[in-house]
Image (cartoon, rainbow, N blue to C red):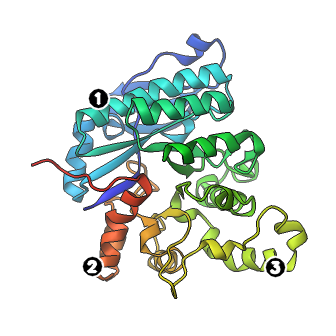
Amino acid sequence: MRIDLHTHILPKDWPDLAAKYGYGGWVKLDHYAPCCARMSIDGKPFRDITDNCWDPAKRLQECEAAKVDVQVLSTVPVMFSYWAKAEHAHDLSRFLNDHIAGVVRAHPSRFMGLGTLPMQDADRACAELERCVKDLGLRGVQIGTHVNGLNLDAPQLRPIFQHAEALGAAVFVHPWDMLAKDRMSKYWMPWLVGMPTETCLAVCSVLFSGMLERMPKLRIGFAHGGGSFAGTIGRIEHGYHARPDLCAPDCKHSPRSFLADASSGTPARFWVDSLTHDADALRALVRLFSARRVMLGSDYPFPLGEERAGELIDSMGFGPGVKASLLGGAALEFLGVHSVGKSA
């Protein structure tokens, strides 16, 4: 079973959001050629996409070519719209979540879904989270690494995580607005350097805040292999012990204590995806988290993703049990499901 946990989807069309809500900043989609569209914000190009971003038939065709059994669908993070008025972000979230749920309903053996939330308003976010799980049948939500500068440990966000734990909803954290982007405008560095840093910051915010101690049943995972976290865990752990006055006021256990324990076979307390583009980095993730906590993720259909989902895993000579966990088992546990797959 090959389950790609990290894939993005958009509707083929949506309303003119600037006209609908009365102010700018919204993403507009222009179908400028057959099978091609341009995402723009206030007239400034953001990204060109092709029909595999909105056409389920095209996605399924490419899944067959890559031997992917199931894709987990989530929106493109630029659509989070945490900066907007909460009622408008909530309205857009409902539209995007209804679309994902519709694609899943049409192909229940090939797709699962993660919703999006108006994180700038905890009450609205909790209501939409409940609708995603109970009414739409989504397995959880995708959220950003911060909410308008609030890190994930912010007290304002705590009710959302508590509600996710109570509902048994998975929370997949994806970077969206990167640190120091004003200093990294050249060389694509917001995506190459900013995104891994953003994700590491989000991981550390969760660990140092004691969130996982207070919410033992919360299932939370991080995109892009957890960003730079695995490469800096030694420094992070040392800092926790060297300056507990700064690092440890809210957490009784060190960062490393939330990672896998090889002696007992206990996996890490949280998940990451496999998107590292490097065999040594992926091998380190398996060692630090265990194969039960590293999920196949390709970032389909974007250029920084893995062109054929699972190709790196396939190339590394993992044993059957480890490989099965990486390709599907870890994602099933994260999503809280027992099985899913192609129909006959």
Vertical arrangement, residue 171 with respect to residue 52, above or below: below
Q: Inspect the image, locate mark 1, and give the three-letter code of the amino acid beneath it.
A: Pro
Could one spot residue 306 in this view of the protein? Answer: no
Vertical arrangement, residue 116 with respect to residue 165, above or below: above
Instruction: Give the CA separation, mark 1 to mark 3.
Output: 57 Å
Whole-percent x, y for residue 59 in the image? 27, 43
Identify the residue under disc 1: 34
Whole-percent x, y for residue 139 in the image? 41, 44
First of labels 3, 2 by sequence position? 3
Whole-percent x, y for residue 45 in the image? 55, 33
Q: Residues within 10 Å of mark 2 (few under 14, many from 20)?
A: few
Query: For the residue labelled by badge 1, is the local secondary structure a helix, a strand or a loop?
Result: loop
Q: Nearer the viewer, mark 1 or mark 3?
A: 3
Mark number, residue 177 = none
Determine the residue located farthest toward the right in the rendered image: 245
Identify the residue under disc 2: 320
Q: Inspect the image, locate mark 2, and give the three-letter code of the amino acid beneath it.
A: Pro
- Residue at 59 percent across and 41 percent down: it is 163
287 vs 316, nearest the viewer? 287
First of labels 1, 2 by sequence position? 1
Q: Inspect the image, locate mark 3, and give the three-letter code of the amino acid beneath it.
A: His
